Amino acid sequence: MRTRIAAAAAVVALLAYAYVAPGLRRHFIRDVITWDAEPRDTKPLPHAFGLGLQPWPRVRVILIDGLSASTAATLTTWTSLCHRGIDMRVDIGFPTVSLPVQVSLWTGLTQQQTGIVYRSDRPLVPPLATSIPAQVPGSRAVAENHGYIVRSIGFADVQPAAVDAQHPAKDADAEAWKTAWQAKAHEAIASNARLAFVHVLRVDTWGHRTGRESDAYRKAASESDAILAELYAAAPDARWFLLTDHGHRAEGGHGGEERELRQVQHCIVGPDVTPHKGSGPIHLVDMSRALADSLNVTLDSRSRGRPLYAAMAAPLEGDDAVPAQPLGSGAIALFILALGVAASMWGFKRWWLSPAWFVLACVLLVIVRGQPTMSMRMVYAGEGKTMYLAWLAALPIAAVTIWFGMRVTTLPRVLVSQLALPFAMLAGTMTACNAWPGLFGGEVAPIVARYTAYTSALYLITAHGSAAVALGVLARTVHSLFGRRRPAETTQSAT
């Protein structure tokens, strides 16, 4: 009787978790895209000697949002101007999301130093007060759309304006602005403002909709190149910065730590700029330093930005721009994982009681969908259907293992053998990306390279695994109650 009560309690607990876990995952995703992270310092960049840029009377910056380096190389005007100036590969760091990247660009601080790591449709209110444009009187910015990004930076004059103070993320007169923005951008570039910035969004829009390899994406890039040609003709005597904030995956999407998204092409062109091509990637904060030097303003004292020619003499290697996992949380995560492995090994005395379903589920996810990153739509999707269709075939293994396992060992052992490792993996990734405060109402973004995306997947894997294990326990318990054969009757003699 005690065994049956324990089995019933286990079934209820596991099914309850399977029910609430998808909601916990959606809460986790909301935290990822909404809140800021705790600011922390970043590792130093390679040291080298070299000069920076000298100040210039007028600086013009165009940023084509979402332009991958491979696509930039196909653009006529972009390529022609880059050949005439300083052509560089720039690593924008992590995450590869527009607002945090632009905050980094205009402050000289990495995403980890600012703590601004996603903030989907959440502008900075009030705008940055110590950014580069905030130090340049009369600085101007014009955005094609999603003006909340440039409204967050600290420019003196920003277009389009917000609808009102209650809706700071929404652009005023959005429909009319679609036909007016290019004229406003031309006006800003041709003006006497010392700093003018134009943010072109159409490439990123089509990157999200159809992917980097689509005709629509290439068409948007070609249109942006034509806009660049027109704007450059309005101020050929200015010093021009040709920038982008991230690339796109072939299937569309960005946000993760992939090099194809982080490493983009930037160029600096001007009457006093000698053509030069960099040998390796420099950091985005080095580009911040180049902008600050050009405008004769100062960066935050915490900035790691190096003089441009020093940065080009000491390029980054590999994934230097990806922030390292904090030692404390990383060590705790490994300890949790080790406990999960030890507990699982305690649970299965026979090899076939190992959590093979979980290993197979993870393998199927990577094989069918690819290694999860913050650039993939499936990581954010509410249902997670794209992910879980990959591993459904592994779930019956959990139920079958429970069915036979309960015949040869105790219920606690068989439950631990199947679930200790999956839950330890989830707890470990949550620890690595600081996701625990969010469960208790904390407003902190749990964003860390690699671990954030895996946490989204592990919520669903553990939910589905728990349901499969619960069904296995239920089936074996019911069978033990009603599946017994009646004992054979004793044969009676004739007498």
Image (cartoon, helix red, strand yellow):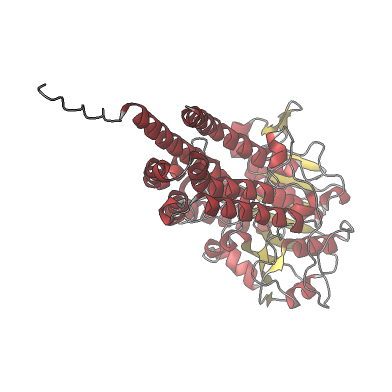
Q: Residue at x 68, y 35 (%)?
A: 439
Query: 291 or 191: nearer the eye?
Result: 291
Q: Is residue 301 above or below residue 103?
A: below
Q: Nearer the viewer, residue 281 or 384?
A: 384
Above-or-below relation of 134 to 168: below
The residue depicted at 74 percent of the width and 42 percent of the height is: 36
The reply to whether residue 303 is visible in this rendering is yes
Q: Is residue 145 left or right of residue 138?
A: left
Pinpoint residue 13: horizontal percent, then vertical percent.
54, 30
Measuring 84% from the left and 47% from the top, which residue is drawn there?
138
Q: Is residue 1 above or below residue 264?
A: above
Q: Say if residue 120 shows up in the picture.
A: no
Q: How many marks?
A: 0
Q: Position of residue 184 (x, y in %)?
A: 69, 43
- Left or right: residue 289 versus residue 20 is right
- Closer to the camera, 404 or 221? 404
The answer to whether 187 is drawn above or below residue 54 in the figure is above
Q: Residue at x 53, y 45 (%)?
A: 416
| Quadrant assignment for the C terminus | top left
**Quadrant housing residue 72:** bottom right
Find the residue positioned furthest to the left.
Answer: 494
Q: Residue 243, percent across and down? A: 67, 59
- The outermost residue toward the front is 495
Left or right of 475? Residue 284 is right
Foreground residue, 420 or 111? 420
Residue 383, percent across and down?
A: 49, 35
